[in-house]
Amino acid sequence: MKKLKVIIPMLSFLMIMASCEQESDPVPAQTSITDAQAKANNGRPKTMIWSDGLLFESVVTPAVFDGDHGNYDKLFAAGEGKSFQDGIGLISESKPGDQDYNGGRWHAYVLKQGVKTDYSNACSVEDLDLNDFEPTDNYFECPLLPRSN
């Protein structure tokens, strides 16, 4: 039953990850920048991620890891039908230039079902109550890139 409670708020996040493994790599509408940009990245979906109040782009890659090996940063997902500042669905705990940044290797956390806190203005981990999020079994790579306009 607990897994079902995690799956429902993770639908947006899982759609990004599932698209990595498909041959055509469709771009999810809620996380894409434009279809043209995705095609320029070999069809890989792009998403936006907040970190310390800075907005980064990221190209989703098909790399998935075993969580028992390696170092990972936490990536927090707002959950189904929710978002952080400016409609962005993800916040990372670390970014390029931080001493503890692990190069875009992530352990995904999702907002617990039933949490009523409004995170619509959050753009950094400091804006979150980390007790409102729960870890998933998802470990993957999605490097943070400078934002292009």
Image (cartoon, grey):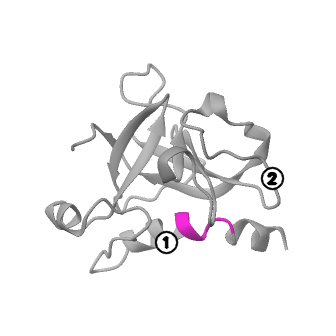
Q: Which residue is mark 1?
A: 15
Is 76 located above or below residue 23 in the figure?
A: above
Left or right, 113 with reference to 79: right
Q: Is there a contact, CB below 8 Å, between mark 2 and mark 1? A: no
User: Of 31 and 25, which appears nearest the observer?
Assistant: 31
- Expressed as whole percent of the image width and height from the top left, the position of residue 96 reads 36, 29
Q: Is residue 12 magenta?
A: yes
- Expressed as whole percent of the image width and height from the top left, the position of residue 97 reads 36, 22
* SS assignment for the magenta stretch, majority: helix
- Number of numbered callouts drawn: 2
Is 124 located above or below residue 8 in the figure?
A: above
Tell me the residue at 41%/61% (across/down): 31
Could you tell me which quadrant the N terminus lies in? bottom right
The amino acid type of the residue labelled 2 equals Lys
Q: Is residue 55 magenta?
A: no
Q: What is the crowding at mark 1: few (fewer than 14 residues within 10 Å), some, or many (at least 20)?
A: some
Q: Which residue is mark 2?
A: 116
Name of the residue lying farthest toward the left: 40
Q: What residue range appears in magenta? A: 9-13
Tell me the residue at 27%/37% (across/down): 146
Q: What is the crowding at mark 2: few (fewer than 14 residues within 10 Å), some, or many (at least 20)?
A: few
Could you tell me which quadrant the C terminus lies in? top left
- Expressed as whole percent of the image width and height from the top left, the position of residue 45 reads 32, 64
2 or 1: mark nearer the eye: 2
- Expressed as whole percent of the image width and height from the top left, the position of residue 124 reads 56, 33
Q: Which mark is residue 102?
A: none
Q: Is residue 88 visible?
A: no
Point out the tag, 2 or 1, that comes first from the N-terminus.
Answer: 1
Element type at marker 1?
helix
CA–CA distance between discs 2 and 1? 24 Å
